[in-house]
Amino acid sequence: MKTKLLLASVLALSVQQTALAQTDALGYTQANMTMGPSYQNRVFFNLANGNMVSQPANTWDVAFYRNSNFAFGTRINDALNIEVYAASTNLADWDNINIDNIANWGEPLYNPDQATDISQGAFEQGPITSSNPNIPSTGWGTYNSLTHHIEGKAIFVLKYTGSNSYIKFAIVDAFGGYTFKYSKWNGTSWGATETRTLANGSDDAYFNYFSFTTGAKVPNMEPSRSAWDFMFTKYYTFYNNMMMYPLTGAIQGPSVKVAKVQPETQETAAFTTPADSNFSSNITTIGHSWKGIGTVNNDVVYYVKKGSDYYRMYFTTNGGATTGDMYFKYKKITATLGITEVSKKASFGIYPNPTTADKKVTVLFDVKEKTDNKGNIEVYDLTGKKVYTAELTNQAGFYKQELNLAHLSAGNYLVKISFGGSTETKKLIVK
């Protein structure tokens, strides 16, 4: 028994020493992140604690965004080399879809790699648009302002380029989850139509995942939202301005913004943090921009902003598909900057959201300092037209201000709040 306890102690000490050895003289911790040979895994990374969660990359086909009853979005699994074709804008054509017509369906659709919203995937690039400028287009369905459901209109065909197989797919309805149907091509005809409903559920993840192979939801494919900052994965991009091509790299989560600086010395104690305006929500700000062919670009540095914290990071190893290794170093630099909260003089909230029938909205403020604070509220429709503006009271502490939006028609709007030199934008649904 004593021998076992001693062995356990030695092993624990060994792990601790390995972790300590990964912090260099400049205070950077090396993350030996790997996706495995042939990029077989998808890996989530958390800057605050260095945790990595690895999941098989090929066990799901479609992911459904589940932020709220009113949110919508999908992602195709790029690890499966899927091309999406919009075959029809009428669900009544379901039984008449013929893959021999694929050449007439236009260019294939992909998850957009230049998006600032991770929820928007291949189906959102589809042909269904809204005739009402106050109601967003989904690419696959239209919003019903009476029921608040999104009613599906488009039929898609998914082509798996690696196996040359096909699946017919349509989202029928979305509200608090998604109802969809699909059918597999057996080489000569479509198989039986399967219909599924995936409720959003209560777990704290951005997406629910579905497999056409098992015909069921795939559980535990993503950590909770607060548990990751970067997702290392395969994604399609317009490579060298020539064609859509699958590459691998880091996609940033919604909770972080990134500023890329090139050229900059990586290993240095002296650096200048970029201005806030240089930080981007583009999901592939890091992406594959640190990679060469089997090498790393040794003059690229990334600054990461998460809430009031800042990090500096750069890559050290690119193992390619042989190993899937993507090692990088990172360091929290908030204390170095001498700040605990940056450009954040106030916190804001909006309720109720969606509005009630009277269309009155209350904006809550928690203002930390009054001196020279000036602010205003602007409401924009989804065409970018300003439809409401109001000045904010100049005071400190916690208070609220009511907005009367009775003149606005039902739909989705963006509320831009500017205060003390900072701005924040929130989505508002007006009933």
Image (cartoon, grey):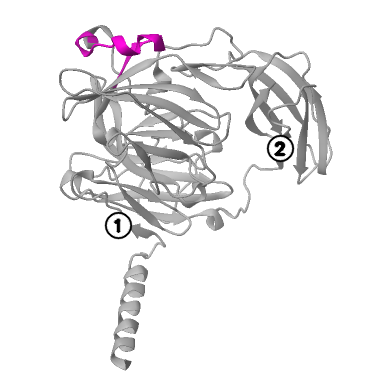
Type of the residue with mark 2: Gly
Q: Position of residue 139 (x, y in %)?
A: 44, 17
Q: Is residue 205 left or right of residue 212?
A: right
| Residue 257: percent from left, percent from top | 49, 39
Query: For residue 93: magenta?
Result: yes
Residue at the far front in the pictured view:
192
Is residue 274 visible in the rendered image? The answer is yes
Q: Residue 349's mark?
A: 2
Quarter holding the C terminus?
top right
Do residues under tags 1 and 2 come within 8 Å of each other at their CB atoms?
Answer: no
Span colored in magenta = 84-101
Whether residue 175 appears in magenta in the rendering, the answer is no
Q: Which mark is residue 32?
A: 1
Give, as a three-letter code, the residue at label 1. Asn
Q: Nearer the viewer, residue 160 or 421?
A: 160
Q: Residue at x 59, y 10 (%)?
A: 133
Q: In the image, is 361 to the left or to the right of 141?
A: right
Of the 4 image quadrants, the one containing the N terminus is: bottom left
